[in-house]
């Protein structure tokens, strides 16, 4: 059995040796509930000295924003790298072409060019895998709302196919693609190819705004509140300057996440974003209440809090720009673990922070929040995997489970073909690392379900597999302490042989404390660490988290048990499922 399990996991994660218009759902007043999101911990912070509210950055003649001289002390290493050379120059001034023409051996001879490939290229969405894939890069795309096309998917498949067993792709927890195996000399041509199919990787790493997340069922959901696609698209266009670069917001103190909520299901996880747009009506006009400050980091995790602000739907960009500029101008740039926006909010207090946002709004005005949002707090989150009717008569969407988000080039080609043959040539990526095929004619559903690819990417996975999430792990990521994707699958398969669960249990794996796998929002989370086994030998392990919740009653999970050797996780997880999630042991089930 173990051999069979290992073989199936290898097939999922590694390539074969040979190629093979806004709409608002009607809601009664009874379904609208007051905002009950967390409030700031410090209601009455100490008065803020006016000198603290002086902008720490200034714009240069060439349009970039840099730290003023008097604020250049006590900086973290990443800030020093930005000061030494403007990262966006690699894109906006064509520096990538010169860099791509240099051999890696030549690049490594100087700190400046080495920092180019290891740090500054992240502004172009390129991450050097120096530790595990020297000379190769992961490229992270911008994919607002997770919406992509068959043409785009085939292009990306072609890119990774050229790299053989070094190339693959992952669906991420921010609804976008990451492709792997990229070689630096190929980057200029790849960037041009992306542009030709309407994609970009620009500003998707480091101290930039990450992929705007929205409802994966936007525009097709019979129960949606608002179609999030127009908002996420315009946000992405603003962020990237329509693919040309937007240096106004590329020198943030740290990364920054944004989402637009479109359904009662809160698929977008607003509580873990730096800015979340919550649909709300005020004075009969549609708009959004704003939550700010949600984030994960190795030293601290916090849920987003209300800004006590509402904007009409047409003002999504002005308020986003104002918040980003307040963060850019005033955020700390010292200790890297204390540079996320919530640290600034804590320091200033929510009202002072809000006043700084107001200063940067057109006309210097920002309305207070609507008393009610449009989220039904009693709504039971729906499962989007499988076959479901769309709001459009005669059409359905089909949610496919992508085990831990990993796909090969051949998979992407097949997904593109299926989207064309059965749907409208569109695919939707989700934050749980799955894929939705929308706009399938009901008469074609049965035929689609017979496609061989669906044996691998099932529309009806098991209750433990369907919400399984895993970060990249140390197969590729230099920061990961443990291997995650293959282990997540293996542990889950072994646990499934021990127990039967009555409902979905969300399990997330992350290879290190950076928690890209978002273990704090999981029912059961696993954060990689090194530990010692029963014989005292050093081995890979995990801190086990419990209690994470998503939805209107969101809650961040906490450590349940620290430093568990990975080889001891299966019985522990089985016990947790029995004791806390109503699972039944298989031997007992068989006896009954």
Image (tube, rainbow, N blue to C red):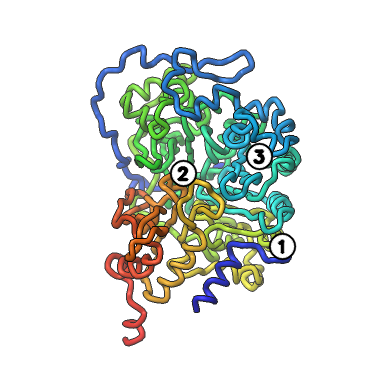
Q: Is residue 575 above or below residue 88?
A: below
Q: Is residue 571 above or below residue 365?
A: below
Q: Which mark is residue 335?
A: none
Q: Compare marks 3 and 1 and give the one earlier in the sequence.
A: 3
Is residue 183 rendered to the left or right of residue 212?
right
**Which residue is the site of mark 2?**
261
Taking depth in this image into account, of 210 and 384 the one nearest to the observer is: 210
Q: Quadrant of the C terminus?
A: bottom left
Residue at (60, 23) in percent of width and height: 85
CB within 8 Å, label 1 to label 2:
no
Residue 355 spot, x, y in % from top left: 37, 20
SS at mark 3 in the image:
loop
Is residue 106 rendered to the left or right of residue 489?
right
Q: Compare marks 3 and 2 and give the one earlier in the sequence.
A: 3
Let me know if residue 300 appears in the view: yes
Neighbour tally class for label 1: few under 14, some 14-19, many 20 plus, Cα within 10 Å = few
Taking depth in this image into account, of 277 and 512 the one nearest to the observer is: 512
**Which residue is the site of mark 3?**
200
């Amino acid at each position: 059995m173990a051999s069979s399990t290992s073989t199936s996991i290898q097939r999922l994660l590694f390539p074969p040796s040979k190629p093979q218009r806004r709409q608002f759902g009607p809601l009664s007043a009874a379904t609208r509930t007051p905002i009950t999101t967390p409030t700031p911990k410090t209601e009455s912070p100490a008065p803020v000295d006016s000198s603290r509210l002086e902008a720490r950055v200034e714009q240069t003649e060439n349009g970039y924003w840099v730290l003023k001289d008097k604020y250049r002390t006590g900086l973290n290493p990443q800030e020093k790298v930005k000061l030494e050379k403007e990262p966006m120059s690699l894109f906006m001034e064509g520096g990538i072409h010169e860099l791509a023409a240099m051999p890696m051996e030549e690049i490594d001879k100087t700190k400046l060019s080495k920092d180019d490939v290891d740090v500054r290229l992240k502004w172009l969405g390129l991450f050097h895998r120096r530790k595990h894939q020297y000379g190769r890069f992961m490229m992270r795309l911008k994919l607002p709302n997770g919406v992509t096309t068959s043409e785009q998917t085939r292009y990306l498949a072609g890119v990774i196919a050229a790299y053989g067993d070094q190339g693959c792709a992952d669906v991420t927890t921010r609804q976008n693609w990451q492709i792997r195996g990229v070689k630096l000399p190929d980057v200029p041509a790849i960037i041009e190819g992306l542009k030709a199919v309407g994609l970009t990787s620009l500003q998707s790493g480091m101290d930039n705004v990450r992929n705007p997340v929205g409802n994966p069922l936007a525009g097709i959901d019979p129960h949606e509140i608002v179609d999030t696609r127009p908002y996420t698209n315009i946000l992405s266009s603003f962020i990237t300057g329509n693919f040309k670069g937007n240096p106004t917001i590329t020198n943030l103190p740290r990364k920054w996440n944004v989402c637009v909520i479109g359904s009662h299901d809160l698929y977008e996880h607003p509580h873990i974003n730096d800015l979340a747009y919550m649909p709300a009506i005020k004075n009969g006009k549609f708009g959004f209440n704003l939550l700010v400050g949600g984030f994960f980091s190795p030293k601290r995790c916090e849920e987003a809090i209300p800004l006590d602000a509402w904007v009409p739907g047409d003002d999504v960009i002005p308020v986003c720009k104002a918040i980003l500029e307040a963060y850019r101008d005033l955020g700390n740039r010292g200790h890297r673990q204390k540079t996320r926006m919530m640290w600034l909010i804590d320091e200033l207090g929510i009202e002072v922070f809000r006043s700084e946002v107001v200063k940067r709004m057109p006309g210097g005005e920002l309305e207070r929040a609507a008393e009610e949002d449009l989220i039904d707090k009693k709504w039971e989150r729906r499962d989007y995997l499988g076959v479901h009717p769309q709001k459009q008569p005669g059409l359905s969407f089909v949610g496919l489970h992508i085990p831990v988000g990993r796909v090969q080039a051949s998979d992407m080609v097949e997904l593109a073909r299926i989207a064309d043959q059965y749907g409208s040539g569109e695919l939707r990526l989700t934050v749980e690392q799955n894929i939705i095929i929308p706009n399938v004619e009901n008469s074609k559903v049965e035929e689609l379900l017979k496609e061989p690819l669906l044996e691998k990417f099932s529309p009806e996975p098991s209750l433990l597999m369907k919400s399984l999430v895993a970060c990249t792990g140390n197969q590729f990521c230099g920061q990961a302490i443990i291997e995650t994707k293959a282990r997540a699958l293996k542990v889950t398969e072994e646990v499934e042989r021990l127990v039967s669960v009555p409902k979905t249990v969300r399990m997330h794996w992350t290879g290190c404390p950076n928690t890209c796998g978002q273990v704090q929002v999981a029912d059961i989370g696993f954060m990689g660490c090194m530990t010692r086994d029963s014989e005292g030998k050093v081995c890979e392990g995990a801190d086990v988290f419990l209690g994470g919740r998503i939805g209107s009653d969101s809650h961040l999970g906490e450590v349940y048990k620290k430093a568990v050797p990975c080889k001891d996780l299966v019985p522990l997880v089985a016990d947790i499922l029995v004791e806390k999630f109503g699972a039944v042991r298989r031997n007992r089930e068989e006896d009954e």
